[in-house]
Image: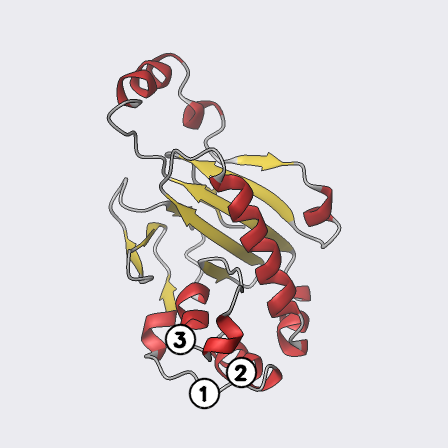
Amino acid sequence: MEQLFLIDYINHYDLSAYSGSVGDVCLRCNKTYFEIKDESNKTLTISESNNFGEAKIANPNKYMVEIFNYDKFVSALDAYFQDDKKRCDMILATDDDFILGELKDSQNKKAESRARKQLLQSLHTIRAVPAIATYITQHSVKKFCYFNKKTPNSHSESINKTITAFNPLENIVPNGLKMENKQIEDLGFEFWQYTGNQVLTLS
């Protein structure tokens, strides 16, 4: 994805060249299981440790997974282009999968709605670039993924522990929840939500 964004995207929108480190925005991983954490400085960190990040990824076929830090990338572009431009945190791709992901660790009930808007605008922005639009069509699995670690706060911790003990959602639906959304489906994508320890399994 490096050329698609650092060259094609930049040229399409007539922007100044990306001035940051390529290694900060273009990541790769082929581990069978890994987690991705969105740090406060917009850095995405990958680890094999459990309960480390917001996004938990199973990669049983050991694909080389490309992870593009879209938020950090856009944040380094021309200021006028950034203005009021909602963007998702990351774009993840294998030969089969093309995934736009938003990572949160929040108890706020409005976070999911905001994440959905960020994912939608991100898709519209990147798909306007012809080379990226073509790249997307080459993937058989296309998803919007909202990952929310939902670390319990002091008020809700005891309640969440009780709920988890009797009805652990990740045990009932460990591979996330597919949410109905006609607007997203009309764009050829599915909308999935992953909370707590639910895991995205790559194709």
Q: In which quarter of the image is residue 127?
A: bottom right
**Whole-number angstrom distance, CA of label 3 to CA of label 1:** 10 Å
Labels 3 and 2 touching (C-beta < 8 A)? no
Query: What is the three-letter code of the residue carrying label 3?
Result: Ala
First in sequence, mark 3 or 1: give its number: 1
Residue at image coords 45%, 78%: 77
Measuring 45% from the left and 60% from the top, which residue is drawn there?
Answer: 90
Q: Residue at x 42, y 35 (%)?
A: 108
Tell me if 130 is positioned left or right of 77 in this view: right
Residue 17: assigned label? 1
Looking at the rendered structure, the secondary structure element under dot 3 is loop
Q: Earlier in the sequence, mark 3 or mark 2?
A: 2
Q: Where is residue 109 in the image (x, y as percent from the top left)?
A: 47, 33
- Visible residue check, residue 10: yes
Does 166 sit above or below residue 169?
above
| Neighbours of disc 1 within 10 Å: few (<14), some (14-19), many (20+) | few
**Vertical placement of 149 versus 189: above or below?**
above
Disc 1 on helix, strand or loop?
loop
Q: Earlier in the sequence, mark 1 or mark 2?
A: 2
What is the distance, in whole Å, between disc 3 and disc 2 at their CAs? 12 Å
Q: SS of the residue at dot 2? A: helix
In the image, residue 15 sits, relative to residue 174, either above or below, namely: below
* In front of the other: 154 or 149: 154
Kind of residue at badge 1: Ala
- Mark 1 to mark 2: distance in Å? 7 Å
Classify residue 56 by image quadrant: top left
Q: Position of residue 25 (x, y in %)?
A: 38, 71
From the top left corner, tell me how far across and down residue 152 is, in percent: 30, 29
Q: Is residue 176 left or right of residue 12?
A: left
Q: How crowded is mark 3: few (under 14 residues within 10 Å), some or many (20 or more)?
A: some
Three-letter code for the amino acid on which mark 2 is drawn:
Ile
Can you tell which mark lies on residue 10? Answer: 2
